[in-house]
């Protein structure tokens, strides 16, 4: 009995896992940490070094450097990464076998007999058995959910780059528009001064001066609008990167190829269409979710069978030691029902034949995408 208890105790200790302590949220500390973010952060410099970029805040911030900064600071990207890690952990946990259940049933019998131990102690370890195909379905669900989570992270990384680069372009264009608006206002003020001198000399009438002043007011209004546009663009860039607006106040932004975009011939329509069809990470994630749903269907189909468990145990019955081997059947209804009755109750007759077409959907989707790519290529030619 001592050896049996020692073995059960070893199993219990092996099943113990360390649970990390809960992390208390401190909104004030999080806000202070966000306000302290700057582009000269040491972690950002290390990330730029890994990508082969200059790790110096005084060097012009090109689209590549802005992209790395967004990947480092963007809170949305951090949230997606955390969700992906949680999904992978849940998938790994779902693919594991169920933990055994330990049953301990001590009883004391008041029989009045002397010389016989009144105690009956039973110890059993319930080992659940899997349904047919349950292990393969669980592994398929784990693989599909993990791949979908990784595809969603890839999509979020690309979306973060797209948002940061687009915001950088808007800032540079807004600054250029403001510079042009300042030049226009300066020219209008010069023209108004010249018209005033002409009116004072009697070479022009009062209407010309009013028209010149009206044009100057329009230029001033346009300059104010351009300033507001620049401020909004800079706030959008700070939000895309994940830093406060003050962090971009002294940064020198530059886009070397902004004035010389690639020629239309550098982007063949057929190649662009093929890349758009085959490199859509969001479609890959949806297909992974579909494979997961199909595996869930196979897992649910296994519930037609009753849940059974093997329970090897030890029984100390009033001084007698017994080793038992029991099989338990657990189901919502009584277990003696046949498999055919379970199939009718769970999925109805012909369940497998009705589920077969849905299992072929991923192959049909892949063929449809391939035909669509070929059709786009023919149209581009």
Image: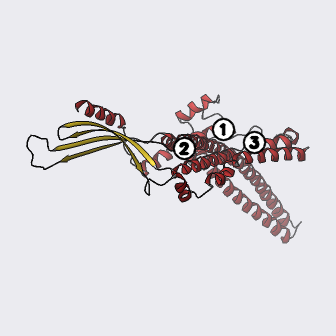
The residue carrying mark 1 is: 61
Q: Give me the C-alpha separation between circle 2 and circle 1.
A: 22 Å
Q: Earlier in the sequence, mark 1 or mark 3?
A: 1
Q: Residue 228's spot in the image, x, y percent? A: 67, 57
Residue 76 relative to residue 112: left or right: right
Q: Is residue 229 visible?
A: yes
Seen at 65% across and 44% down, the residue is: 155
Q: Give me the C-alpha separation between circle 3 and circle 2.
A: 26 Å
Q: Earlier in the sequence, mark 2 or mark 1?
A: 1
Q: Nearer the viewer, residue 38 or 129?
A: 129
Q: How many marks?
A: 3
Q: Is residue 261 visible?
A: no
Image quarter hosting the C terminus = top right
Residue 78 shows which numbered tag?
2
Q: Residue 319's spot in the image, x, y percent? A: 17, 38
- Nearer the observer: mark 3 or 2; the answer is 3
């Amino acid at each position: 009995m001592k050896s049996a208890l020692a073995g059960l105790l070893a199993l219990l200790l092996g099943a113990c896992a360390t649970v990390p302590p809960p992390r208390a949220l401190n909104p004030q500390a999080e806000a202070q940490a966000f306000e302290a973010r700057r582009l000269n952060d040491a972690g950002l410099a290390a990330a730029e070094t890994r990508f082969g970029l200059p790790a110096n805040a005084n060097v012009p911030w090109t689209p590549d450097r802005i992209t790395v900064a967004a990947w480092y600071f963007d809170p949305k990207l951090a949230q997606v990464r955390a969700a992906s890690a949680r999904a992978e952990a849940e998938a790994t946990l779902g693919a594991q076998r169920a933990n055994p259940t330990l049953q301990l049933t001590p009883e004391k019998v008041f029989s009045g007999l002397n010389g016989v131990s009144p105690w009956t102690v039973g110890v059993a370890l319930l080992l659940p058995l899997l349904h047919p195909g349950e292990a393969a379905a669980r592994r398929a669900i784990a693989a599909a959910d993990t791949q979908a989570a990784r595809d969603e992270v890839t999509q979020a990384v690309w979306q973060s780059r797209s948002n940061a680069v687009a915001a950088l372009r808007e800032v540079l264009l807004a600054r250029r528009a403001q510079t042009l608006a300042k030049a226009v206002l300066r020219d209008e003020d010069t023209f108004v001064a010249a018209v005033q001198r002409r009116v004072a000399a009697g070479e022009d009438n009062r209407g010309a001066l009013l028209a010149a002043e009206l044009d100057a007011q329009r230029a001033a209004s346009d300059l104010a609008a351009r300033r507001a546009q620049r401020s909004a663009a800079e706030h959008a860039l700070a939000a895309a990167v994940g830093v406060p607006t003050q962090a971009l106040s002294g940064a020198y932004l530059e886009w070397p190829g902004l004035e010389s975009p690639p020629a239309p011939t550098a982007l063949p329509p057929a190649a662009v269409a093929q890349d758009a069809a085959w490199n859509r990470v969001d479609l890959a994630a949806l297909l992974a979710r579909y494979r997961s749903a199909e595996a869930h269907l196979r897992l649910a189909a296994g519930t037609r069978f009753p849940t059974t468990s093997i329970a090897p145990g030890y029984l100390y019955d009033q001084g007698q030691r017994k080793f038992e081997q029991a099989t338990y059947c657990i189901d919502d209804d009584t277990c003696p029902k046949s498999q055919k009755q379970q199939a009718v109750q769970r999925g109805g007759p012909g369940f497998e034949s009705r589920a077969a077409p849905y299992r072929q959907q991923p192959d049909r989707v892949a063929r449809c995408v391939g035909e669509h790519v070929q059709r786009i290529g023919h149209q581009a030619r």
